[in-house]
Amino acid sequence: MILNMVLVLAAMGSGAWAAPNQSPLRQTLPQGDVVATDENGVEKNLFLANESVAVNVKNGSFTPGSQVDIYIVLDAAWNEGDAITADVSGGVDTVTVNANGAFGPPPPVVWPAPLTPGRYDIVFDANRNVVFDAGDGVDDAVLGTGFVVEAVPPPPVPVGGIAILPNRFELLAPWIGLAALMGVVVAAVVVRLRRQG
């Protein structure tokens, strides 16, 4: 009996927590282990709409050689058993885990530019069942949002440049005001000269 228990525990090993149909990860995914990055692998939580979103995993959390489905979804609160909602990046990305239990190098781009402004999560579906469950990960779930996309700000107006105004009156208004001011000054000088002479 004791020998059977020892054999069962040994067989279960580090993947004991995984679902039966799931390739076990080498460890559970602590919060912050799955991250959004730029194309160079630098962790990033704020993107402009003209940038691309890549992903990576810290600490070699996935089983080398396994495949993971990666979804970009609208920001949500995630609980075990939740269905993974529709990917907004143009399709689910399936990435093969490298020998270190992570992705790349370089990190895979999962949402190429252009991006749509908003708040998003990245869901890593390790057993590829479209359900958020044991062994899966969400980018920065503790913070509540994986990453934010903002619109590209307009380019700055060059100093000394010419601004083309949409209304001709707006272009002429300063000149009309200057002409009116000069008319008042000339009238005041004429009145003063007449009083003196």
Image (cartoon, rainbow, N blue to C red):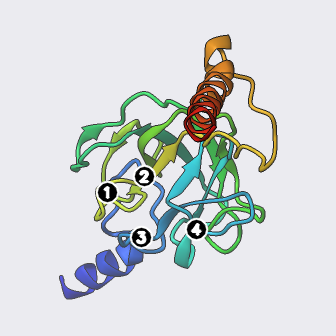
Q: Which mark is residue 134?
A: 1
Left or right relative to 178: residue 121 = left
- Residue at screen point 54% across, 43% down: 69
Q: Earlier in the sequence, mark 2 or mark 1?
A: 2
Query: How busy is the neighbourhood of tag 4: few (under 14 within 10 Å), some, or many (20 plus)?
Result: some
Q: Nearer the viewer, mark 1 or mark 4?
A: 4
Between 8 and 122, the one lying in front of the other is 122
Residue 32: mark: 3
Circles 2 and 1 in contact, beta carbons < 8 Å: yes
Query: Looking at the image, is mark 3 or mark 4 nearer the viewer?
Result: 4
Amino acid carrying label 1: it is Ala
Q: Is residue 142 left or right of residue 169?
A: left
Q: Where residue 78 sits: x, y (%)?
A: 25, 48
Of the image marks 2 and 3, the number of the one nearer the N terminus:
2
On the rendered image, what quadrant is the C terminus found in? top right
Near-viewer residue (195 or 77): 195
Q: Which residue is mark 2?
A: 22
**Percent x, y for residue 41?**
68, 66
The residue to which callout 4 is attached is: 43
Please report the residue visible at 30 percent of the width from the left and 66 percent of the height from the top. 17
Question: Does residue 167 show up?
Answer: no
Give the Cα separation between the discs numbered 3 and 4. Answer: 10 Å
Secondary structure, mark 1, is loop
